[in-house]
Image: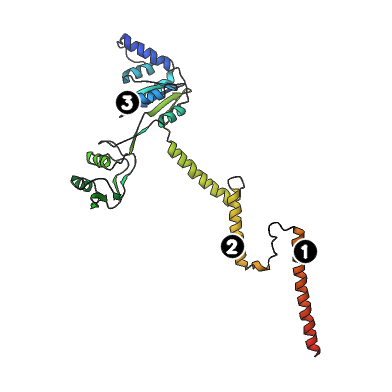
Amino acid sequence: MGGAKETHVSESKKRKVKEISEQMKRKTVMIISIKGLPSAQFQDIKKKLRSKAKIQVVKKSLINFALDYSSIKELNDLIPYVEDSTAILFSDEDAFVVSGLLADEKSPAKAKAGQIAPCDIEVKAGPTELVPGPDISALSAVGLAPKVESGKIAIMQDKVIVKEGKEITEALASIMAKLDIIPFEVGIEPIAAFMDGKVYANIKIDKEGAVLEIENTFGRGLAFAVEMGIVNLETLDLIIGRAGAEEKVIDELVGVEKEEAEVVAPKGVPPAQMASANADKVGKKEDTEEVKADEAVSDSEK
């Protein structure tokens, strides 16, 4: 037991705590954030995940009570992650699999005053759909350089209007809405999860970031393998291409003349025929040299 104070609990709360406690026997118990998530979208996500997970939205005190009095003492470690805007999720799936499912159910959302910018938010130079009027002053007020072109407002140069980690003001949120800049995603955020006797605090899945990191790592590894001459299905073509390019450079450096090289057999010509042709060529060359030698002797006798 967690040693909590004795307190009166209504029968309905007892039933809810008992229900939560039963669900805590499943493979994954996850604390999730539903802050800022519209009710309609929340219900839609719950419906989509119905076969994979069960989500309970109850008061913070009841979640803490259920965690504190659970027969699994390690669940107490989830208590610090429970806040007023959190809910609790149960699943027989791996916690990281569930986190990936939640990541797939996010939707774009416009900025609101008071939110923290998730990254540098930049307005690119170019035309807008805004017409001349009060918006010119509003754009200038947030540091942009507006100009009227062809009856519409245009932005004359790129500008970061809010840095990552900075608070978004009402004026900035309004401008972003007017310019159709949507910097946020809303959905259910995994906070922490209990699985296999252990609490995992960092369980968010960034699929796009993971794919980008894998691509970058693969590119660096491929370049290293080619440099080291490690031959496999991925590097073979690159190594052959590099060898060909280096051979060409060497040929140019030593001044190899292609016309002195042996004639390469045209497609479809038997090797024996080409060998005979090469022999004839050599014979003709020798005959020419003998004639020149005879002429030289005759000239000397005269």
Describe residue 127's horizontal placement relative to residue 75 as left or right: left
Whole-percent x and y of residue 22?
A: 42, 14
- Residue 37: which disc? none
| Label 1: element kind | helix
User: Which tag, 3 or 1, sits closer to the chain's start?
Assistant: 3
Quadrant in which the C terminus appears: bottom right
Depth check, mark 3 against mark 2: the one in front is: 3
Q: Residue furthest bottom?
A: 302
The amino acid marked with disc number 1 is Ser
Name the residue carrying label 3.
40
User: Which tag, 3 or 2, sits closer to the chain's start?
Assistant: 3
| Label 2: element kind | helix
Question: Does 297 sit above or below residue 140?
Answer: below
Depth check, mark 3 against mark 1: the one in front is: 1
Name the residue carrying label 1.
276
The amino acid marked with disc number 2 is Val
Q: Residue furthest left?
A: 134
Depth check, mark 2 against mark 1: the one in front is: 1
The amino acid marked with disc number 3 is Ala
Could you tell me how far apart the alpha carbons at marks 2 and 1 are, in whole angstroms? 32 Å
| Label 3: element kind | helix
Whole-percent x and y of residue 63?
A: 35, 19
37 or 156, nearer to the observer: 156
146 or 89, nearer to the observer: 146
User: Which tag, 2 or 1, sits closer to the chain's start?
Assistant: 2
Is residue 82 at least partly visible in the picture? no
Q: Counting other residues with Cα less than 10 Å from the Cα at mark 3, is it few (<14), some (14-19), or many (20 or more)?
A: few
Are the residues tagged 3 and 1 within 8 Å (C-beta)?
no
Quarter of the rendering containing residue 203: top left
Name the residue carrying label 2.
249
